[in-house]
Image: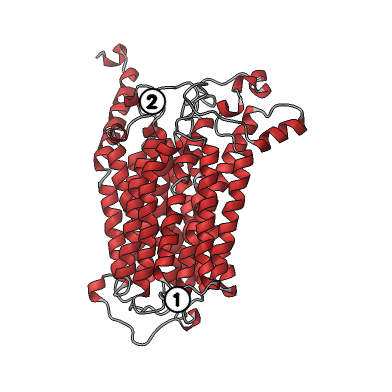
């Protein structure tokens, strides 16, 4: 984002109070590497908290609407479905009006789309707002606001609120504050870390998404037996606490804390290896004072439109699982037995365990191949059979369900993680920008904002389609995965052509005049 150290007309940063206190106690300045570690750790746990609060509603769904019909699993294709008569999960309880009625599933879907629609719209503007604010303050406001409205959702339990519009408004405001997170944490990390092994580093760092989902699922599931309100309030307090930690300790950029890698004793005492890019941040905000790249100009950066549209369909699939997987599990008999709310929530975390592996694997593969589009498209194509087998055979046994869920999570979340991190960073520092580094926030907002619209569409359609057939939902998800892969075809072909050209260039020097003599 627009991070500068200019004394006039620019953002003035003050070192976080906690960092000043640590330096006072220590009696010396914090090193550059320590600042890096602090920035990486705090942004990791900050976005983990964002996703933990986002995940709680999917666990609460099964307590609010326990009486949706089940559908026979004989066929993946919805037009061949055979409804099961008189079956439901009796372990889920009586529900909570207005979601316990016949239209409860659709109403829950509308809450999801309201949250995600506002989140997507907010994403497009959050980068521009952050350009004009201290990111530490901007993130703190976003996290405290997210915690407040997440908790207010849970307050409906004790206040005995049964008005749909109360939950709708609370979810929309929660979505608005949630949109502050992603462009901001990417920009902060970008200020501290260079381009070397970007895919792998960001793949590991991006595991906060899946670990946040796991944390949210486990905490919400454990608290559900005490009343569903606790499943919302406790994570809400958690992100507020993390927001305060961030406010007191986050170093936004080297310039904001007066850190210089040349002042690091370790760096001075040890010679830097050739090709070491540690000192070159993804965003050279501290020395680049040109105006930020405009919205339309960012759209014209080669690859932005293709990856944005790909992420639309990729997040449609990923967020359908994020918001509906515990609900789906609780309404599907596995080995002839329905799971309780807590068991369903805990089992659903394995999807995100697979997502952690997928994100790291996709980042590592794309680094080794130097081919982001090929990697992302390959994962999306592999997600299609994974979805098919999970729907068709996931109910056969618990062991098979776990294995198939892990595989599905890996292929679904892999490209999603890759595009929102390494790809966004690549495009935000594209050569067409001619050195203007102030594009990452806007590019990140465009890519993830477009993807978030797809994230809103998936859960909304699921809320309606699932009332007739879950097989139809999985057919929709397989179609979305196919389209996501196809949207990268042009970029895949360009990468393949580049690899072929590179191989030919490598072979030419190996032929010498003596080799050609007869």
- Where's the C terminus, which quadrant? top left
| Residue plotted at (26% across, 52% down) | 483
Mark 2, Cα crowd under 10 Å, few <14 / some 14-19 / many 20+, is few
- Say what secondary structure mark 2 lies in: loop
Of circles 1 and 2, which is in front? 2
Q: Is residue 54 left or right of residue 427?
A: right
- Residue 395 percent coordinates (x, y): 41, 73
Q: Quadrant of residue 262?
A: top right
- Where's the N terminus, which quadrant? top left
Note whether 483 is above or below 135 in the view shown.
below
| Residue plotted at (32% across, 50% down) | 312
Confirm whether residue 397 shows in the render. no
Q: How is the image coloured?
A: secondary structure
- Verify CB contact (< 8 Å) between mark 1 and mark 2: no
Q: How many marks?
A: 2
Query: To which residue does mark 1 refer?
Result: 334
Mark 1, Cα crowd under 10 Å, few <14 / some 14-19 / many 20+, is some
Q: Which mark is residue 27?
A: none
- Residue 336 percent coordinates (x, y): 44, 81
Q: Is residue 427 left or right of residue 398?
A: left
In depth, the one of 370 and 111 nearer the eye is 111
Q: CA distance from mark 1 to mark 2?
A: 57 Å
- Residue 178 percent coordinates (x, y): 46, 51
| Residue plotted at (33% across, 60% down) | 458
Note whether 383 is above or below 221 in the view shown.
above
- Say what secondary structure mark 1 lies in: loop
In depth, the one of 9 and 388 nearer the eye is 9
Which of disc 2 and disc 1 is earlier in sequence?
Answer: 2
Query: To which residue does mark 2 refer?
Result: 291
Note whether 180 is above or below 368 in the view shown.
below
């Amino acid at each position: 984002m627009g991070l500068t150290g200019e004394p006039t007309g620019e953002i003035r940063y003050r070192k976080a109070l906690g960092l000043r206190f640590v330096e006072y106690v220590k009696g010396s300045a914090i090193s550059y590497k320590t600042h890096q570690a602090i920035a990486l750790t705090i942004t990791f746990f900050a976005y983990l908290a964002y996703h933990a609060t986002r995940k709680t509603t999917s666990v609460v769904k099964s307590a609010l609407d326990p009486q949706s019909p089940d559908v026979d699993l004989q066929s993946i294709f919805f037009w061949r479905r055979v409804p099961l008569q008189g079956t439901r999960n009796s372990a889920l309880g009586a529900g909570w009006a207005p979601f316990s009625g016949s239209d409860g599933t659709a109403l829950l879907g509308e809450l999801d789309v309201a949250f995600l629609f506002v989140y997507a719209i907010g994403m497009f503007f959050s980068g521009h707002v952050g350009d004009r604010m201290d990111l530490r303050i901007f993130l703190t406001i976003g996290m405290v606001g997210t915690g407040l409205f997440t908790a207010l959702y849970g307050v409906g339990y004790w206040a005995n609120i049964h008005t749909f519009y109360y939950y709708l408004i609370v979810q929309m405001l929660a979505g608005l504050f949630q949109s502050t997170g992603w462009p901001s944490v990417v920009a902060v990390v970008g200020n501290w870390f260079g381009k070397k092994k970007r895919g792998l580093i960001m793949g590991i760092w991006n595991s906060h998404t899946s670990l946040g989902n796991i944390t949210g699922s486990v905490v919400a599931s454990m608290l559900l037996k005490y009343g569903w309100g606790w499943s919302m309030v406790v994570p809400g307090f958690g992100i507020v606490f993390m927001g305060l930690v961030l406010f007191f300790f986050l170093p936004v950029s080297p310039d904001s804390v007066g850190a210089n890698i040349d002042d690091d004793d370790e760096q001075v005492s040890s010679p830097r290896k050739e090709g070491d890019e540690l000192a070159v941040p993804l965003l050279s905000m501290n020395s680049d004072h040109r105006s930020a790249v405009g919205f339309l100009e960012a759209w014209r950066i080669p690859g932005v439109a293709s990856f944005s549209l790909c992420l639309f369909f990729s997040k449609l699939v990923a967020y359908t699982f994020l918001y509906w997987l515990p609900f789906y599990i609780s309404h599907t008999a596995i080995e002839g037995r329905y799971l309780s709310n807590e068991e369903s929530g805990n089992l659903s975390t394995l999807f995100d365990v697979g997502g952690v592996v997928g994100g790291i694997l996709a980042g590592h593969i794309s680094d080794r191949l130097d081919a982001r589009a090929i990697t992302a498209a390959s994962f999306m194509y592999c997600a299609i059979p994974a979805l098919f087998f999970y729907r068709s055979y996931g109910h056969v046994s618990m062991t098979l369900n776990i294995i198939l869920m892990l595989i599905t999570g890996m292929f679904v979340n892999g490209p999603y993680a890759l595009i929102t991190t390494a790809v966004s960073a690549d495009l935000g520092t594209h050569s067409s920008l001619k050195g203007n580094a102030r594009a990452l926030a806007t590019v990140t907002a465009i890519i993830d904002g477009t993807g978030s619209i797809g994230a809103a569409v998936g859960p909304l359609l699921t809320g309606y389609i699932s009332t007739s057939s879950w097989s139809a939902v999985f057919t929709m998800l397989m179609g979305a995965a196919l389209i996501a892969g196809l949207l990268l075809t042009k970029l895949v072909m360009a990468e393949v052509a580049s690899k072929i050209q590179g191989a030919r260039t490598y072979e030419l020097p190996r032929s010498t005049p003596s080799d050609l003599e007869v």
